[in-house]
Amino acid sequence: MNPPFRPANLGLCTVGLALATFMQVLDTTIANVSLPTIAGNLGVSSNQSTWVITAFAVSNAIALPLTGWLTRRFGEVRLFVAATLLFTLASLLCGIAQSMGMLVGFRALQGFVAGPMYPITQALLISIYPANKRSQALALLATVTVVAPIAGPILGGWITDNYSWPWIFFINVPIGIFAASVVWSQMRAKPFQNEKPRMDYVGLITLVVGVGALQLMLDKGNEEDWFNSSFIVGTAIVSAIALAIFIIWEITDRDPIVNLRLFRHRNFTAGTLALMLAYGAFFSVGLLVPQWLQTQLHYTAVWSGLAAAPLGIFPVLLTPFVGKYASKMDLRLLASTAFVVMAATSFIRSEFITTIDFQRVAEVQLMQGLGVAFFFMPVLTILLSDLQPHEIAAGSGLATFLRTLAGSFSASITTYLWSRRAVVHHAQMSETFSPFNPHTQGAIQQFGHGDLHVAAANLERIITQQAYQISFNEIFHALGWLFLALVAVVWLAKPPFHKSAPGGAKSVGGNEAAAAAH
């Protein structure tokens, strides 16, 4: 039996893999706060500028489930290095784009080549680390997943304010070249079985059409007023038909482009379901808190980012310990602890008021970070635990795709509910106001000093703010119960989650022979 491949410098190789993944995850959020500046410089409307985000999300969602097939065709190392270099090139092209059309096209390319980077990093870390250290490697990757989206808006806002928006893309160039060079120099000798799987054209076409239409519907739904728009109705119908054909075809095809048969594994199914629902809820928090801070409490983009930033402190500090000692604990218990903490912080936010101060917001974010520190690594380990070694890249890609899709659903649903529930509460509060009501007359005197028009404007502002605050609180109350329900979902998985390799070492996603040795 050949000894497992190890890079000459494991630490340097890990830095290269982590940097590339950090760069890729960072780019999912770094452009968000720069959209107004980009729109102004390129002479387009604010609505048109959102295609910078949509193009990346659509192409990334299409590429993610193709990771397994691409890995079989080109090998993990070659695919990772090629994707990283192409991502770097796409970043450079985004920075020098002279029109919105060019920028959207290059962002689509950037999103597509970014697709395999995260799942391949996961597979490579598992393959190069000694069996008893793999939990630490996954914990490191989980930290990158948490910290990069938090850092994105802060870094993007600072770069845009102090330099210019193209630099949010140019900073990727040296990082990408360094990461690709390090990983190639350290891992080019890693053996791989060069397969030539046939191209599943039906699966590919239905995947591209179905996922592309679905992602467009989710990204543009709120902007187009959902099913009152013929565009949204059309994309929904196209997506439903294409994805139905895709699922039926992939389940029955002998060599599918996306291996849906991975769901025959109990832990992969339970872990992926927990990851989807938990990430969707977590994404709602990450989306709603900054929006609420900026629109209702009038924080700047940078200050709202700083208020949210404490979320990343505990994951960074606790990562070494979680990775080191997690193998000695029931991972379902760790994940349950995470969900209980995140439920508690959601219930705390459901009591927020409009006069809350920066410190309290940051404290709750810090507390949630404790839950996040115990969330990603245990759930990732559970979902990979009963996959065969050759299935890990495909499984990671499929789980990451479903996690991303859950985030898109979450963003659309959260934004819709927040605005629609605010309209309902605004109407309910406005019903009580009448010029003949003594309370209204007192409010006119208080807020307008007897001037009806001034009082009406001030009261409208206050009612609107309170309506959005009540809606915010309702959503977080619901999120609290969702996090608690996830405790039951994660216990659908069955141990062992750390299968033994020969000699009794622990591993993630070991093979059946190793499991028998246990």
Image (spheres, rainbow, N blue to C red):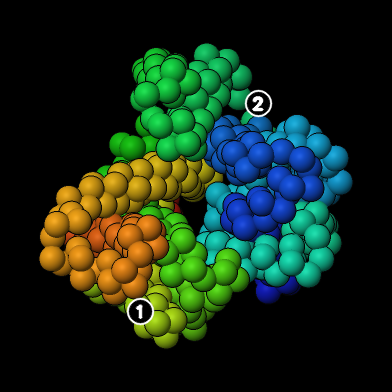
Residue 29 at x, y percent in the picture:
59, 56
Q: In the rendered structure, which disc, 2 or 1, sits on the residue that comes first in sequence?
A: 2
Q: Nearer the viewer, residue 16 or 417?
A: 417
Q: Is any part of residue 426 visible from this angle?
A: yes
- The amino acid on which the numbered mark 2 sits, given as a three-letter code, is Lys
Q: Which residue is mark 1?
A: 356
Q: Residue at x 75, y 37 (%)?
A: 100
Residue 114 at x, y percent in the picture:
65, 45
Residue 443 at x, y percent in the picture:
24, 68
Q: Residue at x 23, y 58 (%)?
A: 474
> Farthest front residue?
450
Crowd band around label 1 with a 10 angstrom C-alpha radius: few (<14), some (14–19), many (20+): few
Q: Is residue 132 above or below residue 286?
A: below
Residue 107's quadrant in the figure?
Answer: top right
Q: Secondary structure at mark 2?
A: loop
Q: Which residue is mark 2?
A: 196
Q: In screen coordinates, is 232 left or right of 349?
A: right
Q: Residue at x 77, y 40 (%)?
A: 43
Q: In screen coordinates, is 504 left or right of 107?
A: left
